[in-house]
Image (cartoon, rainbow, N blue to C red):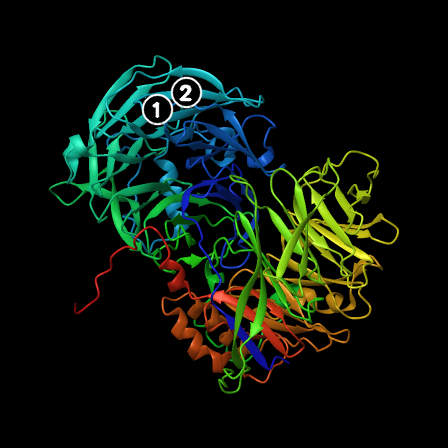
Amino acid sequence: MIDTLYINNSVEWNPSPVVALATSVDGSQVAAARADGSLEIWLVSPGSVGWHCQLTIHGDPNSRVSSLVWCQSGRRGGPLGRLLSSSIDGSVSEWDLFDLRQKEVLDSIGISIWQIAAEPRNDLHPSMKQEMKSYENGHDNSSITSGVDEEDNSESEDEDADKFAVQIHEDNDADSTRLAIACDDGCVRIYTATEAEKLIYNRTLPRVSGRILSVTWSSDANRIYSGSSDGFIRCWDVKSAHEIYRITAGLGGLGSASDLCIWSLLALRCGTIVSGDSSGNVQFWDGQFGTLLQVHSYHKGDVNALAAAPNHNRVFSAGSDGQVILYKLSSEAIGSDNGKSFPEAIKRWIYVGYKRAHTHDVRSLTVAVPICHEDLPPDERVKRSRGQEKHLDFSYHKWTHLGVPMLISAGDDTKLFASSVKEFTKFSPHDICPAPQRMPMQLAQETLFNQTPLLLIQHSHSLSICCVLLEKGVVSDVGRGPSVGLASTELVARVSCKAPRKIICSTISSSGASFAYSDHRKPNLFELKRNKSGKNLWTVKKRQLPKGLPFAHSMIFSSDSSRLLLAGQDRRIYVVDVESTEVIHAFTPCRKDEIESLPPSESPFTKMFSSKDCQWLAAVNCFGDVYIFSLETLRQHWFISRLDGAAVTAGGFSPKKNSNILIISTSSNKVYALDVEAKNLGKWSLRHTFSLPRRFQEFPGEVIGLSFQPSSTSSSVIVYSPWTRCMIDFETPVDKDDDALLANGQGLTKKLHSNGYNKSLKRLRSDTIHSGRKNFEFRPFVQGCALFVEHLSENSLLVIGKPWKQVVGTFDAQPVHRHIFGT
């Protein structure tokens, strides 16, 4: 039972803007590049549950990414494809998801690269291989279909759109992909990505006046369209490298051609070209002749990005006004004088509506198709209540179906929002990243320094170690819930890495006497001492680790602070004795049927947990596989494949005397209690894991951490996200939801995603946490977005966070101006 919450909002939190997005070849993952050089890989979900940042790669902070593209080139890159990025410095890099590294595949060409585009590949989309009928200038000779509006059936829209699509490019060379690069010198350069590590130069299209800012391929890969800073859209023949025609984009909209920038281009399978420019116009052009079909001027600023639904019957645009706008292909019959219509239809792109979830410029859009699916347990599908069914006021599961395309948007406000492509106007965008670039933190609760709690905060280029001080006399009673007090931090030590290196991982021992971090070069170990006298109260001494140790993706100390455990870049886990700084052992992880003596071939480990009795070590890779090692016998004990096919979001060993129970939470909002000694699910999981309350399965926000009570008799854990926390007691029965609690839990989800976030939390506080339930009860964070939660004692909890409005106030970019009624 938590009696007191201690809140600290003074931590520095400066997330970086998102500059580019790209969807993997199989459509299951999205890459997001940020301005600080880091890249995130997000697992796509068909609703609000299951979004998870699988891994983060720390790239070169001095090389700003201008665009991302995922392309297929043989077996290299696997089913996801090769992830490439262009840079303002003129280089092209590949992001290795196996080694978690940024590798340069094209040396700088000496001029800035604004965009990179891969040719379409029909072998990646089997549903698009069928012969499809084309139309020209918006006309078609097929049978007339009724007009399509925003309320029509989605399946009929998809079938209708397929009738007006052309067959896409047939490529016999499945081991290579051509790339078109938009360059600052007015040229489009073509390279080929093959099985080789480096890109192969193909040819350069003739130079034009102005910068080439955008580039895209036609669906048959025979043409390239480029947009430049002189206001022209040019169509190029790829084989001859000749210009077929040029379009003066400024003549069809509000801007003039001379000062117009074509920021984004999109080539649809129906033959239509879509452009977005600096005047706020979204224009639709005939791809064969270059004539203007339609123009929409709904944006109040530059149009930065365009994206299309998989069937190309919907187009989305985003710009510097924070809007994301939907346009849809609609059929209009041509009628005669006698009221009868000819067997011909005009296709027009109509404005449907907009969403404005972002507070700043939207920089990028992408569409992904999730391959995961949240299904109900068999007993819930069969058993139904005979009483009157109560209507649930809201549920994101209304559009959580397999294969539902999702639109992801991101920009200067550092957040990522997801919307259903087919139900764009019906549901508000979902904030899949409520705490972008959350700083890793760790609390040493009872240290050697008079039991003073020490907090380790990892920044991009430095570590801060602070004393946690509880302010007396400021604890306030908020009613039925726990009292709220203030906690302050006092800086003890700060250690910086050499520029331009970035800190990948860090840890502090439970005693507080040792801490460590790793950058891309090597791991580093430090000793912290408190002096009884002298000018400096605290001193930091660097310890020398053995040479040859690889840099680490994850590191922890054992519970007794005697060993440092490093998950190296070479896939081995090194056990280092802290006192002698010698390597005691190196684990080589393997699956069940493999031999441990073979070279490691697993994915990098991004999370590790150790038991309180220093007997067990659990290592988790970025895909959710769990490896259990015995620290007594120094051998691998157990391998657990991905639990329910989901990634692991948080974990830890139970603090009870029997520390064989490993608690794991997954991105599908399931909790597992694993008996590592018995190599099986624990008794609690066998009974409850697959029948958790539905209000927990719709946990608001991604689970980012677990907090255990520091007691050997405790049986509970706090599971938390940036928005709320939930207590689970493993010795209390798990009851199924009744209608009131289910509606209450889903109402919580609705209100947390509404615009009035803070006000809703205050109103919900008394509604959601006092329903008479002690197990699986939700307690939202009223004070702001939570970054870190940990027990200070059995009855007190430390919450470190910050109101999002304060974070927005630190951004370099200015928010989008919004008119307030009555001003």
Judging by the rendered image, the residue that carries numbered circle 1 is 224
Q: Nearer the viewer, residue 766 or 550?
A: 550
Label 1: few (<14), some or many (≥20) within 10 Å? many
Q: Quadrant of residue 57?
A: top right
Binning the other alpha carbons within 10 Å of mark 2 as few (below 14), some (14 to 19) or many (20 upward) gives many
Quarter of the image where the C terminus is located: bottom left
Looking at the rendered structure, the kind of residue marked 1 is: Ile
Say which quarter of the image contains residue 336: top left
Q: Is residue 413 above or below residue 742?
A: above
1 or 2: mark nearer the eye: 2
Which residue extends farthest top? 240
Tag 2, which secondary structure? strand
For the residue pair 692 and 487, the one nearer the viewer reads as 487
C-beta proximity under 8 Å, tags 1 and 2: yes
Could you tell me which residue is drawn at 73 percent across and 43 percent down? 545
Q: Position of residue 143 (x, y in %)?
A: 30, 38
Q: Earlier in the sequence, mark 1 or mark 2?
A: 2
Residue 642 shows in the view: no
Observer able to see residue 425: yes
Residue bearing the label numbered 2: 190
